[in-house]
Image (cartoon, helix red, strand yellow):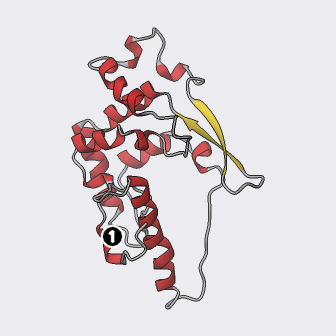
Amino acid sequence: MNAKVSSSEATSRKTILNLTHHEARSFLLKAESYCGLDFPPYIVFGDLIGGVPQVLDGKRLSDFRRSSPREFDDVNYTILHNKDGKYSWRPFELIHPALYVSLVHATTEEGNWQLIRERFRQFALNDKVCCLSLPIVSSSDEKDRAEQVSHWWVGVEQRSIELSLDYDYLLETDITDCYGAIYTHSIAWALRRPPTFE
């Protein structure tokens, strides 16, 4: 990680929203985009993720089974992860590769991708909220994940130090089990409904 990155460089980093729908699809179909967990080096997903698009080419998931994919809740693989070696175990779900590729293809269809980009442009109009979690596209020899960590370090850690000159208090919050508890329909609502900032 390059510790000498300035705040202006952090905000000028290329996010996934700067990509065309074709580029976004290629980015999301990289093995490291599919799974960011640290596995032993002999566990790789590149060939698997790379092979699924050829199998799905021109087909829907429902073409492979009579039932809808939403009827198969147990097709993903759950991995328990411990962040700090203490008692906090967090379940991560490794999405089935066919579901992942199908979701990437649907998300990066040109019309859908334009809708997503436009909605995030509208969200960015609220200057009280700064989104630093968008995937970063590495423009150097660094991996995307390293660029993401560097981006977070500059955007959160360094920016907090800058803001401490103007503020006396910092309030930090976290949503317990956010991803496991989120009502998935709210994602579609957020994309379809106009944002209201008060």
Residue 181 left/right relative to 29 = right
Q: Quadrant of the N terminus?
A: bottom left
Q: Farthest residue toward the bottom?
A: 165
Q: Position of residue 138 (x, y in %)?
A: 32, 56
Q: Secondary structure at mark 1?
A: helix
* Quarter of image, res 2: bottom left
Q: Which residue is most to the top?
A: 66
Left or right of 136, for residue 39 = right
* 156 on left or right of 192: right
Label count reads 1
Within-10-Å neighbours for mark 1: few <14, some 14–19, many 20+ = few
Which quadrant is home to the C terminus? bottom left
Closest to the observer, 175 or 59: 59
What residue is shown at x 76% (from left), y 55% (from top)? 86
Q: Residue at x 41, y 43 (%)?
A: 33
Pointer 1 residue:
11
Residue in the foreground of this view, choosing between 145 and 111:
145
Q: Position of residue 75 (x, y in %)?
A: 56, 23
Quarter assignment of residue 5: bottom left
Residue drawn at x 47%, y 35% is 44
Residue 42 is situated, as x and y percent measured from the top left of the image, at 52, 35
Residue 188 on image: x %, y %: 42, 42
* Farthest residue, direction front: 42
Question: Relative to residue 175, is residue 95 depicted above or below?
Answer: above
Amino acid beneath label 1: Thr
Q: Report the residue at 60% width, 50% height from top.
A: 178
